[in-house]
Amino acid sequence: MTTSSYSTVITVDKSPQEAFDAINNVRGWWSGNIEGDTGTLNAEWTYRYKDVHYSKQRITELIPGKRVVWHVMEGYLNFVNDVNEWKDTEIHFDIAEKGGKTEIRFTHAGLVPQYECFDMCSTAWSFYINESLRNFITTGKGDPNEKE
């Protein structure tokens, strides 16, 4: 049985700092339904999608051009039996220059295949990271959920 957390990697033709700045502009690639500061160490912010998903994050690492980590302090998913599956997980963005490009390794540490939400949540993360964030970094236009 595997216990690997969900992870994906993207590569972009932008600098590590440009990628870092885009990641921290969460409203530009994840959702307009974000409340709070998403770019300051120890800041707390919330994500909400209708009555389906709510989470509260604290920024626990913020190393310019290199790393962003969010600790999920609270989480609610209305489509699984354990509505708190995201609580106490961590979301990591590790940024590195590789061969003249920038690689971003995204990991949702604690989002594992044993979780009921794994398939749906990993599919959603795949879209937000591999498409919306990648496009936001490279073109300035992501595809976030619209603000309700």
Image (cartoon, rainbow, N blue to C red):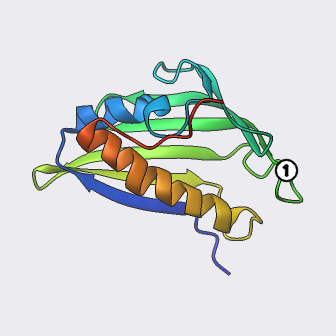
Q: Nearer the viewer, residue 91 or 30?
A: 30
**Is residue 112 among what the camera can see?**
no
Residue at the right extreme?
A: 81
In this view, the residue in front, 97 or 146, is 146
Q: Residue furthest bottom?
A: 1
Vertical placement of residue 95 versus 118, above or below: above
Which quadrant, please, contains the N terminus?
Answer: bottom right
- Type of residue at label 1? Val
Q: Is residue 80 visible?
A: yes
Q: At which x and y percent is residue 28?
A: 43, 33
The C terminus sits in image quarter: top right
Give the number of callouts: 1
Could you say whether the residue bearing mark 1 is in a helix, strand or loop?
loop
Apparent side of residue 28 relative to residue 10 in the rendered image (left or right): right
Where residue 61 sits in the image (x, y, percent)? 48, 31
State left or right for residue 66 relative to residue 143: left
Instruction: Count neighbours of disc 1 (C-alpha within 10 A) and say few if under 14, some if 14 to 19, many if 20 or more.
Output: some
Query: On the rendered structure, is 17 left or right of 123?
Result: left
Name the spot of residue 129 as percent of width and height, x first: 44, 52
- Residue occupying image coordinates x 33% and y 29%: 21
Q: Residue 138 appears in which quarter of the rendering?
A: top left
- Image height of 14 relative to 113, above or below: above
Q: Position of residue 127 (x, y in %)?
A: 48, 57
Q: Which residue is mark 1?
A: 83
In this view, 97 is above or below 99: above
